[in-house]
Image (cartoon, helix red, strand yellow):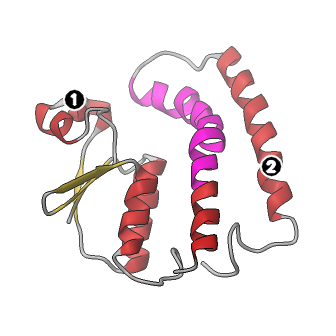
Amino acid sequence: MKLYYFPISPNSRRVVAVLHHLDLACELQVVDLSKGEQMHADILHLNPNHMMPILIDGDFVLWESNAIMQYLCSKVPDNSLWPSNPVIQADISRWQFWQTGHFGRACGGFIFERLIKKLLNLGEPDANEIAKTEDNFHRFAKVLEAHLAGREWLVGDTL
């Protein structure tokens, strides 16, 4: 397997964490988004969204971090990250979709305004965008906090 990734990307980092946790062999290839490497034809051929991460396993090409993590977990049956119980799998998927659609976007606004803009010389942080991001962050953080009340783990009782 080969993973194209950008090390500071949260989506890339979580895929790399799953690889390490499951002890799966995988070649890691950095794609530097700050240098526009995601726009090279060879990367666009793999992922027309020109985003990281991208996993290649033989002839199979997969992008989207949650799909990659689920695929990697399926390679190691009944592991602690993806137990065989379909109810737990559905609960994990629910929170992955929630993170992508809600919490990740809220956090992503901070990351873009405070980090990415600086790294890519895109100007100063936009105070209005940060204010919108803060509102969404607090809204969705309440959902997460309520769910975690009295629990150690988001889903199940183990990592």
- Report crowding for label 2: few under 14, some 14 to 19, many 20 or more residues within 10 A (C-alpha): few
Picture disc at residue 58: none
Query: Which residue reaches farthest bottom?
Result: 78
Relative to 37, 24 lies left or right: right
Picture disc at residue 39: 1
Number of numbered callouts drawn: 2
Compare marks 1 and 2 and give the one earlier in the sequence: 1
Q: Main secondary structure of the magenta part?
A: helix
Tell me the quadrant of the picture where the C terminus can be found: bottom right
Where is mark 2, residue-wise?
143
* Magenta residues (range): 96-120
Q: Is residue 10 magenta?
A: no
In-front residue for pair 151/87: 87
In-front residue for pair 38/89: 89
Tell me the quadrant of the picture where the N terminus can be found: bottom left
The amino acid marked with disc number 1 is: Met
Looking at the rendered structure, the secondary structure element under dot 1 is: helix
Relative to 63, 15 lies left or right: right
**Image coords of residue 156 (percent x, y):** 69, 76
**Image coords of residue 117 (percent x, y):** 47, 25
In-front residue for pair 87/25: 87
Relative to 140, 57 lies left or right: left
Looking at the rendered structure, the secondary structure element under dot 2 is: helix
Residue drawn at 37 percent across, 51 percent down: 7
Residue drawn at 48 percent across, 83 percent down: 79
The amino acid marked with disc number 2 is: Val
| Spatial separation of the CA atoms under disc 1 and disc 2 | 36 Å
Disc 1, disc 2: CB below 8 Å? no
- Report crowding for label 1: few under 14, some 14 to 19, many 20 or more residues within 10 A (C-alpha): some
**Image coords of residue 46 (percent x, y):** 19, 42
Residue drawn at 53 percent across, 81 percent down: 80
